[in-house]
Image (cartoon, coloured by chain):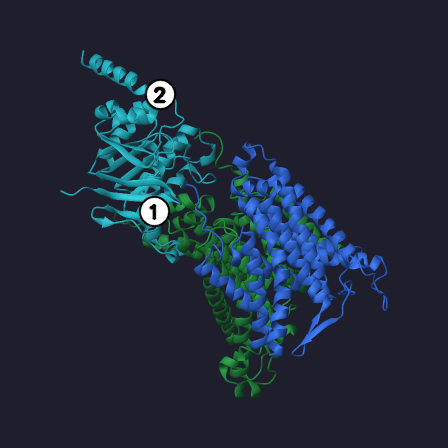
Amino acid sequence: MEARPGPSAAVTALRGVLPFLVGAFASLLLHFVVAPASGPFATKLVMDAGINVILAVSLNLVNGFTGQFSIGHAGFMAVGGYTAGLVTYYGSMLLWGSPAAHGGFLGGGELLFLAACLAGAAVAALAGLLVGLPSLRLRGDYLAIVTLGFGEILRVLLQRTGDVLPTAAEVRRTPLPELATHVGGALGFTGIPFYTSPFWVGIFVTVMLVVAYRLKSGSHGRSFLAIREDEVAAEAMGIPTTRVKVTAFVLSALFAGLAGGLFAHLVGTTLNPRELGFQKSFDVVIMVVLGGMGSISGAAIAAVILTLLPELLRSFSEYRMILYAALLVVVMIVRPQGLLGLGEIWDVWRPRRKGTGR
Amino acid sequence: MSGPLLSVESISLAFGGLKAVNAFSLSLGRRQLWGLIGPNGAGKTTAFNLLTGVYRPDSGTVSLEGRRLNGLPPHEITAAGLARTFQNIRLFPDLSVLDNVRVACHLDARHGLLAALLRTPRHLAEEKAMEERSRALLSLFGLEERADDDARNLPYGDQRRLEMARALATAPKVLLLDEPAAGMNPREKDELTDLIRGLPARFDIAVLLIEHDMGVVMDLVEGITVLDHGETIAVGAPAAIRRDPKVIEAYLGTGAVDEAVDEAVDEAVEGRA
Amino acid sequence: MTKLLQTAMDAVAVGSLYALIALGYTMVYGVLKFINFAHSDIFVLGAWSSFAMAAALGWTKAGATPPLLGGFAILLASMAFCAAAGIAIERFAYRPLRGAPRLNVLITAIGVSLLLQNVGQLPFVFGTQPQRMPQLLPDRVLASVAGVDLRLVDLIGAGTAVALMLGLEALVFRTKLGRAMRAVSWDVKTAALMGIPVDRVVAFTFGLGSALAAAAGLLYAMKYPGLNQPAHATWVLLGLKAFVAAVVGGIGNIRGAMLGGLLIGAVELFGAAYFSPHLRDLYVFTLLILVLLYRPAGLLGRAAVEKV
């Protein structure tokens, strides 16, 4: 069939990028108006929440949309974070002789940071491909074990890495590939410049949400959902299930890597192997399961709530994981699809699939 | 065109020592309607699974328009033009009725993932075409009113019809229907029979039909293949199959044969009178 | 020569523990077709509850010597305790989900696993401090071959593991209960129709698997007495390796789990001894990937065909 042009090419193109423009505007507003007015503590919380939104929504592409179960999301986050950290830390050393943040808003340092995040995302996606290919050919639960194993092995390997090189002279002496082994070991990768700001978090959250939503409402995303619903039937409808599952997994790893890049350059956090272990992966799993498996808004809301909750319940911290774990079991028994299931938050007020016809 | 559309040559499959299907052959021409019958456990669904790539035959070949299909994964067989429904209904229960059909239209989509994420004009046009085609299929099967319902909430008969609409959405050349009338009431069965009868001409497809309801089969098809214990025990026109003692024996056991033959003869005489 | 012999002995000792844990994974997978994520936490519970009992009896004090059979008494007590825990978990967390999608059961199992880990870390349970397990089993050097000591405790450890496996083998293949277990693993619905009390068989399977994991927990602590806190990552990795053992042997296959355990033990310890000790987890994980790629049904498993 011949593809007919829409109302007008310009209008269609504008519609295609409009959500990104709105997101960029909101991010600027957040950065220059909201954040300065609300102080550093609240700003940090907002950035934490944003990073968790990216993690939860990206994990939902696999666990919710495609019905596979990954529990090594923090591993991909670590891959992205360490890659991005390597680029900005050693890159800054080589370019400017010091790892300190360079240039102002959208200056040279931030451009390096943007490149670093994209590089982190790309390497994380590659790691996703390597992990996903052998395990996604098989049905069911193997992915959970393989992703858990991947995250843990990665943690063990990262703990074995060497100290961060502190001076530009040493960095210049060391061959480039060897720099990758100097990421701080068990103590963590310290000294990464703090480039993550409300603006960048806002931009990446926007990209994540728009991508997830457009995916869900298009034919590619429907293939994801079909696999989750019934893999045999999906295959019988001509969907190359293994390839689609791997695509979902790689996309999910890519955004986890992006979140890792933001995390690595955030004030008040240290990129260390323990921080990005299975506990972090489970945190993200809980966000997805509580929010709704397949619900973008559900996962995002759950991510925000579960970022703020520990702050409100500080004295309760010993019981936090117990509460989460118990919640996980109870939700599975009482409301297995999660709070919102496949639906979105706006469907709650405007029920789309109820009753008979129109 | 001269050669058959679908040509199945002596495919066999054994589970351990049990021959599930033995030397099954079939030849379907354009716009032909053919029936596959047999008692429970005769290997009918297994034959479907062999044709659609769920199982790989131990021996024999399946080819569509001269292209060899066996050995391909199921999704490639569907893309090549062989679509099916499932005996035990396998819809996508949490997706809407419309989305169940739209999923199967994905073979129409030629745009990449990036085009979908950027909502390019091509993506929008293809999505629109898919939706229109899906809605047309739904209205053919009388399901347009329920397009926005979850598939799980459809009554049984509607679910069976939705499975057929979904299989047709893959734009097949041959449609395999596994007991489409199962669990339907007589009125629904009549409607379904009329619908199936019209499919070959409307979509330019051949239809292979597994059905337990003899009324439905005999009424619809040009020819029938009868399976029993994995073996093909008879092939022929419905009228001949109806009188074939081996078929009657397979269905009813020995002893019933004479009685059934008498009945069939009576029926035939009445029909002519 | 010394190194080879020492490594081989360690490989058998550790491998038989992996095998004991792997049996629990494989039996539950056999009857219910899901990975019991919380199984490795039962193993941890076995180690820690043994420690708690020893502490309560005053055997953890410096200079205390447990009575000769004290270790075995604790072994039996912790096996019984963990069996009860396993049965309770099945009853309250998994049974309500019988017949639910596999994903839901998997998520529940992850929840149970997290729950066990974090309850175990509470200050009034086991706490967050690492502890040192006292030697509960009699130990002396029995013989010395090529500079390698054959220690009594290692012999008792491996011997207990082998005895438990032989016992399980006899139970599953020679008793009526074992036949019921095999029937349930073949087809739950048909087994129920044949009058087999499925719930009781499943509960028994959980109890049995948990008891074996508890034994592995105590024996592991005898060999490596430094006990990490219950949610420590080392436990997760141990559980993971035992699971890999079950997969390598062919999940659902009891003899496969034993074979897989020994194989994993050998790969890990020979790799650590002859290549690099830091990458031991990586060898096991690589083996898992290779098995998934080339023989997903495992060494002794049969490829499953899904009914359509």
State the image quarter where residue B262 is shown: top left
Relative vertical location of residue C292 with respect to residue B213 in this rendering, above or below: below
Chain letter corresponding to the colour blue = C
Mark seen at residue B187: 2
Residue C207 placement (x, y as % from top left): 67, 47
Chain letter corresponding to the colour green = A
Q: CA distance from mark 2 to mark 1?
A: 34 Å
**Stretch in magenta:** B52-56
Residue A279 placement (x, y as % from top left): 64, 59
Q: Quick one: label 2 or label 1, which is nearer the N terminus?
A: 1
Mark seen at residue B53: 1
Relative vertical location of residue A74 with respect to residue B177 in this rendering, above or below: below
In the picture, measured across the screen, residue B175 lies left or right of residue A297, that is left
Relative vertical location of residue A156 with respect to residue C239 in this rendering, above or below: below
- Residue C280 in the magenta stretch? The answer is no
What is the chain letter for disc 1?
A: B
Q: Are marks 2 and 1 on the same chain?
A: yes
What is the chain letter for disc 2?
A: B
Residue B186 placement (x, y as % from top left): 36, 20
For label 1, the SS is: loop
- Residue B54 in the magenta stretch? The answer is yes
